[in-house]
Image (spheres, helix red, strand yellow):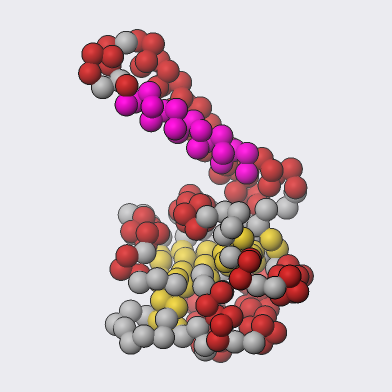
Amino acid sequence: MKESDSKLFDSNEKYRSILNEILRDLESISVGPAVQSKTIKDLISKYRIYIARVDEEINQKTKRLLEYSNSYIINTEKYSERMVYSLIEKSIGKYYSSGLFIIKENPETFYLRKMLELKSSIRTRFIWLTNINTTYEKVSPSNLLQLQKLIMDYIKEIEKQKSMILLEGLEIIKTYNEMREMLKYLKNIKDQISISNSIFLIPFNFSAFTAEEIGLLKGNFNQFP
């Protein structure tokens, strides 16, 4: 992963956000008599082209930043959860044919699930990280062995398919487990990922961990820029 790629990714995301804001403003004033203005119509068309180009640039950077057989920690203080979901949504179906998502909220209301279910060509599986009794497939944040087995079995099941695996709620898992014990299981998963065509994403709030703990994680996982 090149530092220049990560900076371009970051700047392109901001650029796209600005372009989208301008486009929304133009579209809002194009309602009514102003819609007849050729200048407004031309500007809207031009910005749509710009946004499409930036999207393609981001897609290319994403492909380079997220490499198969690798595991990444993502700081949600720098990249919001919605941004992470957007990254997954853009990647899956294009670079990955299936996905396992271990999430910290009810799958029924999970934003990304609704988006991915629109893509009928991909296989998705959602597991709720919770201790409550539920009809949904779940895993307890206190049960590291079960968590590891779920992911390991999934990787073996999909064999050589390109797949994306998401693990949310590391902050929650940490409250139930000692750090070095948690790291041991995560390292096992990372090693299994390294001999597969999958990618492992772990987004969490770095501030929920001590500097020493973040150092341990950075020493074992790639950090998303």
Residue lying at 46% horizontally and 25% vertically, measured from the top left: 47
Tell me which corner region of the image, top left, top right, bottom left or bottom right, holds residue 58: top right
Is residue 114 highlighted in magenta?
A: no
How many marks can you see? 0
The secondary structure that dominates the magenta segment is helix
Q: Is residue 56 left or right of residue 214?
A: left
Q: Is residue 221 left or right of residue 111?
A: right
**Which x, y percent locates residue 151?**
53, 78
Q: Is residue 91 above or below residue 168?
A: above
Q: Is residue 91 above or below residue 72?
A: above
Is residue 16 highlighted in magenta?
A: yes
**Which x, y percent locates residue 187?**
68, 78
Q: Is residue 147 above or below residue 210?
A: below
Observer-nearest of 210 and 44: 210
Residue lying at 60% horizontally and 54% vertically, measured from the top left: 78
Residue lying at 39% horizontally and 11% vertically, measured from the top left: 39
**Which x, y percent locates residue 209?**
65, 72
Instruction: Give the residues in magenta.
Output: 10-28
Q: Is residue 77 above or below residue 32?
A: below
**Which x, y percent locates residue 169?**
52, 73
The reply to whether residue 207 is in sight is: yes
Extreme residue in the left direction: 32
Observer-nearest of 217 and 46: 217
Residue lying at 42% horizontally and 81% vertically, measured from the top left: 130
The reply to whether residue 69 is in sight is: no
